Amino acid sequence: MQKHAMALTVALAICTHIAEMTPAFAADDACASVRAMTDKFNATPRIRLVGTNSLEAIHFTTLYVDTKQWWHGDSKPWHVEPRQYSKTNDLENCEHLGSETIDGVQTEIWSYDHLSYQQVDYWKIWISVDTGLPVKSHF
């Protein structure tokens, strides 16, 4: 009987410790690299991003300068608007797809879902190993 009481005490102590721990979600760990890139991207005052919008089948260039962003698709005119910052808590289903060298820049390729207002954007992004910033993207 004493062995059972001791085993129960140990089990309760372990369960109590586990119950007090902050849960770690696998999705959080899987998206850590993409979240780090997003934080660094948001903090970088000047950046150029070239990408492809798969839905509209256009290639685009976006220039971020301080609190403004300029963008255009294909040969259309440039647009300017306030800079839009990405939220790291809106990222899900991150998956590392491999690596690739683009114009001499070693990158890691990731896919992820970005939850936007009433929609989900599916991204594929190439992140520079050296800078941690995006080099290319498709969404």
Image: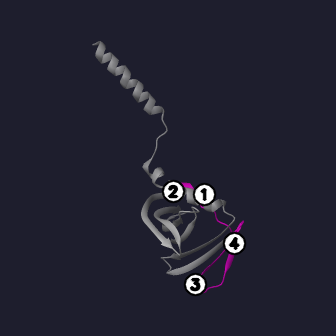
Residue 69: which quarter of the image? bottom right
Q: Is residue 75 magenta?
A: yes
Q: Which-is-in-front pick, marks 3 and 4?
A: 3
Q: Amino acid at mark 2?
A: Ser
Residue extending furthest toward the top: 2
Mark seen at residue 74: 3
Q: Residues within 10 Å of mark 2 (few under 14, many from 20)?
A: some
Looking at the rendered image, the disc whose residue lies closer to the viewer, 4 or 1, is 1
Q: Please state which amino acid type lies under the numbered disc 3.
A: Asp
Image: 12 above or below 89: above
* Residue that badge 2 annotates: 33
The quadrant in which the N terminus is found is top left
Whether label 3 touches label 4, CB < 8 Å: no
Q: At numbered mark 1, what does the secondary structure look like: helix, strand or loop? A: helix
- The label on residue 39 is 1
* Measured Cα–Cα span from mark 4 to mark 1: 20 Å
Q: Residue at x 30, y 12 (%)?
A: 2
Q: Position of residue 16 (x, y in %)?
A: 44, 28
In what element is the residue under mark 4? strand
User: Which secondary structure lies at badge 3?
Assistant: loop
Instruction: Locate residue 24, reporting x and y percent.
Output: 46, 44
Q: Residue furthest left?
A: 1
Q: Secondary structure at mark 2?
A: helix
Q: Amino acid at mark 1?
A: Asp
Q: Which mark is residue 81?
A: 4
